[in-house]
Image (cartoon, grey):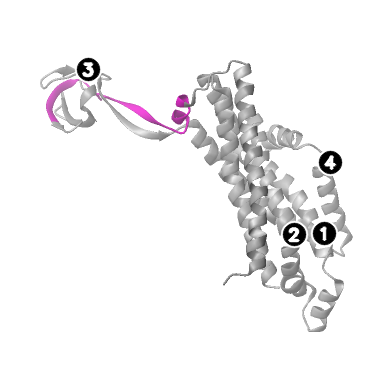
């Protein structure tokens, strides 16, 4: 039998969950009436094409010749062309798009037929760009932040001063300004691509905040832990790696997860250097679909699609590490 106290506790929570549902329904109804007041017409049917669409590819004759053979199979047709030198060109096209017959003459560049295939739309490509930029800059930023955070705790004055200047300089200036400086100044001097410049700027920005998180996490561990490790014969580096950092990691996991979630949203700023990530893809889709609210709701949902699993994974990892203590 289950614990009566646990069952009673779960039953007492249902009214609050119901209240939460009512609040969400109220917000949805308020949004509906708000759009009704401005006479907005929802056009969700225009949105799927921005995720995936049927792309059309044209197939043309490579030179002057004749249609030697047409083999029809289902919805497709295989067209064999023979040029003046006897060379053959074989093209597979959609049968419905074929407007030639066997024996017809063709000239170079003439349209033979079309084929259709599924292709990723701008929102799908924007999502992919946001994901890979977030992952690349997050990994690099974590390494930079770990190194800079440990340098801030170093007994070497030069390492400590340089890491402090880096952290304060990056945290004290806007990310947008840093992206402009990195791309238009450093990127121009070093001939860097916009993608490299965007990832580098985001990584350096993230690294400064990770450095402070690491520094605070290490300082939260009692000094006796490191001293005990040193008394067992471990070097300073070994005690930091095997004793202090594993304990500090458990404490810094929540702020690290929050920082990486912020990084995903900060990737929207790289659109200023012509990188077509998710937000820029959304703006471009609005100019062609005129479905402002629908596109922005989709963009917000895609950001949630990235961040919610990340937040859930961090919470599960935090609980698992807490159980291992």
Which mark is in front, 4 or 3? Answer: 4
| Residue wearing tag 2 | 252
Residue at 54 percent across and 22 percent down: it is: 291
Q: Is 236 placed left or right of 140 in the picture? A: right
Mark 2 / mark 3, whichever is N-terminal: 3
Q: SS for tag 4? A: loop
Q: Which residue is mark 1?
A: 216
Q: Gap in Å between the C-alphas at discs 1 and 3?
A: 73 Å
Check disc 4: other Cα within 10 Å, few if <14, some if 14-19, many if 20+.
few
Q: Which residue is mark 4?
A: 172
Part of the protein shown in magenta? 45-71
Mark nearest the camera among 1 and 4 is 1
Which of labels 1 and 3 is toward the front? 1
- Foreground pick, 28 / 45: 28
**Residue placed under numbered mark 3 in the picture:** 107
Whether 112 is drawn above or below 225: the answer is above
Q: In the rendered structure, which disc, 1 or 4, sits on the residue that comes first in sequence?
A: 4
Cα–Cα gap, marks 1 and 2:
8 Å
């Amino acid at each position: 039998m289950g614990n009566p106290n646990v069952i009673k506790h779960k039953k007492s929570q249902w009214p609050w969950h119901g209240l939460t549902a009512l609040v969400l329904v109220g917000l949805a109804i308020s949004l509906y009436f708000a759009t009704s007041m401005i006479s907005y017409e929802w056009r969700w049917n225009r949105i799927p094409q921005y995720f995936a669409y049927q792309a059309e590819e044209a197939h043309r004759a490579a030179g002057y010749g004749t249609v030697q053979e047409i083999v029809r199979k289902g919805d497709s047709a295989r067209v064999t062309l023979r040029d003046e030198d006897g060379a053959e060109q074989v093209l597979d096209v959609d049968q419905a798009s074929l407007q030639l017959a066997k024996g017809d003459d063709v000239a170079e560049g003439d349209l033979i037929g079309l084929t259709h295939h599924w292709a990723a739309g701008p929102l799908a490509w924007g999502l992919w760009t946001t994901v890979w930029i977030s992952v690349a800059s997050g990994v690099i930023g974590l390494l930079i932040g770990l190194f800079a955070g440990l340098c801030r705790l170093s007994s070497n004055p030069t390492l400590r001063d340089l890491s402090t200047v880096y952290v304060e300089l990056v945290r004290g200036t806007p990310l947008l300004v840093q992206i402009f400086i990195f791309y238009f100044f450093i990127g121009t001097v070093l001939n860097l691509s916009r993608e490299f410049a965007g990832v580098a700027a985001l990584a350096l920005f993230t690294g400064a905040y990770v450095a402070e998180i690491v520094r605070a996490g290490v300082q939260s561990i009692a000094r006796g832990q490191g001293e005990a490790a040193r008394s067992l014969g471990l070097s300073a580096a070994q005690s930091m790696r095997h004793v202090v950092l594993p304990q500090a990691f458990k404490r810094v996991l929540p702020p690290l997860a929050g920082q990486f979630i912020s990084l995903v949203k900060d990737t929207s700023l790289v659109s200023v250097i012509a990188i077509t990530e998710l937000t820029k893809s959304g703006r471009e889709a609005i100019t062609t679909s005129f479905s402002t609210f629908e596109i922005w709701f989709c963009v917000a949902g895609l950001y949630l699609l990235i961040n919610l699993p990340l937040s859930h994974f961090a919470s599960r990892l935090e609980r698992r590490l807490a159980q291992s203590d």
